[in-house]
Image (tube, rainbow, N blue to C red):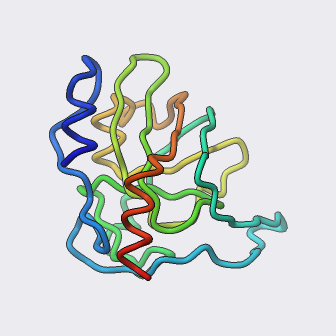
Amino acid sequence: MGVAAGLAACANTISDHTEPAAGGASSGETGVCRVGGPYSINGRMYYPKADWHYQAQGIASWYDPALNGHLTANGEVYDETALTAAHRTLQLPSIVSVTNLDNGKSVVVRVNDRGPFVRGRLIELSRRAARLLGFERAGTARVRVTLLTDSTEKLWRACH
C-alpha cells in the first residue's frame, strides 16, 4: 500500500487499488519471477533483461478481451479486471507506473506478461488499467512508463 498511498498525493493519480502483493498476482494467482531468454515473434527478435531503471514513452494499448482467463508469460492467469500489463523485455513481474500523457492520469500495474507485438506499441494494459487511464474507448494512448524499483525489488526478493 506504500506506493498507492504515495501516489494518492498526486491529483491525477488513480489510487482506488492496492499495490500488488509481493510474490503473488493482483488476482491472487502466483506466477514465477524470471527474465527469460531472447525470443522471436513475427520475425522480430526481443531480448528481455532486468532493467532496474527503466523509463520510456510510447503508445499503450489494452488486451483483447478474448485473452481473459489465459495464462500470462510468468504463469499467472490474466484477469482483465486486475491492474496488470504486458511488456516485451522487462523482468517478470515488475511494478510500473503508467501515466497517460494526454490527461495526466496515472496508475500502478504489475507487468506479468510479454507483449504487445504490434509495431510501435510500448505496453499493453489490462482493460481496467486502460479504463482508469481514460483510453478504453480510444484503444490507445500516449504514455510514460516508469519502473518502480523498490516495489519490483520486493517482488524479486520474495521469489528468491
Quarter-of-image position of residue 21: bottom left
> Which image quarter is the C terminus in?
bottom left
Residue ID at (25%, 34%) = 6
Q: Is residue 31 above or below residue 43?
A: below
Residue ID at (25%, 32%) = 14
Residue that lies at the very extreme toward the left in this rendered image: 16
Q: Is residue 10 left or right of residue 61?
A: left
Q: Is residue 16 above or below residue 94?
A: above
Residue ID at (39%, 17%) = 103
Report the label total. 0
Residue 52: where, in percent of width, then height?
A: 58, 53
Residue 82: where, in percent of width, then height?
A: 26, 57
Q: Is residue 93 left or right of residue 27?
A: right
Residue ID at (34%, 44%) = 108
Residue 146: where, in percent of width, then height?
A: 51, 40
Residue 137: where, in percent of width, then height?
A: 37, 33
Quarter-of-image position of residue 131: top left
